[in-house]
Amino acid sequence: MTLYGVPPTRAIRPIWLLNELDLVCRIENILPFDAESVRAVKALNPIGKIPYLVDGNLTI
Ligand SMILES: N[C@@H](CCC(=O)N[C@@H](CS)C(=O)NCC(=O)O)C(=O)O
């Protein structure tokens, strides 16, 4: 499971939830205003918003 986002932003909410559920998750730092990061986000998440969570074929 991978969470895309930057911890000191609203990404802290899913990180907190995953910690409360004792779920292990890799955090991939995404910089919201970096063009390369934005392209990488849109490749996995067409809505283009962060944070998002990828677990197998599921993207939330
Ligand atoms: N409902 C989402 C909204 C996520 C959101 O708007 N994230 C912003 C960054 S803080 C974003 O991805 N903006 C990029 C864009 O709107 O293109 C949440 O509360 O986490």
Image (cartoon, rainbow, N blue to C red):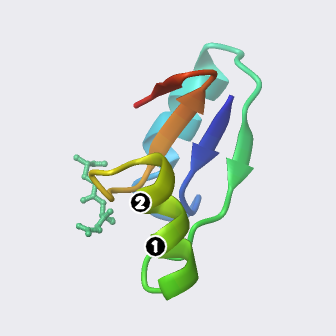
Q: Does residue 24 sit above or below 48 in this rendering?
A: above
Q: Quadrant of residue 2 in the image?
A: top right
Q: Compute the Cα span from label 1 to label 2.
A: 6 Å
Q: Which quadrant of the rendered structure holds the C terminus?
A: top left
Instruction: Residue at 48%, 86% (x, y): give it.
Output: 35
Q: Which residue is mark 2?
A: 42
Kind of element beneath mark 2:
helix
Query: At which x and y percent is residue 17?
Result: 52, 26
Rendered view: 41 above or below 37: above
For this view, does 15 lie left or right of residue 2?
Answer: left
Residue depicted at x 57% and y 51%: 4
Q: Secondary structure at mark 1?
A: helix
The residue shown at (55%, 74%) is 37
Residue at the limit of the structure toward the bottom, as seen here:
34
- Asked which quadrant contains residue 25, the reply is top right
Where residue 34 appears, as percent x and y from the top left, is 51, 86
The reply to whether callout 1 and callout 2 are in contact (CB within 8 Å) is: yes
Q: Give residue 31's quadrant in the image.
A: bottom right
Residue drawn at 60 percent across, 42 percent down: 3
> Which residue was labeled with disc 1?
38
Seen from the viewer's position, the closer of residues 49 and 7 is 49
Image position of 60 with respect to 4: above or below: above
Instruction: Dividing the image into four quarters, tell me where ligand 1 lies.
Output: bottom left
| Disc 1: residue Cβ within 8 A of ligand 1's nearest atom | yes
Say which mark, if any, is on residue 1: none
Q: On the picture, is 13 further left or further right than 57?
A: left
**Are there few (<14), some (14-19), or many (20+) residues within 10 Å of tag 1?**
some
Q: Quadrant of the N terminus?
A: top right
- The amino acid type, in three-letter code, at marker 1 is Val
- Whether label 2 lies within 8 Å of ligand 1 gets the answer no
Amino acid found under the numbered disc labelled 2? Lys
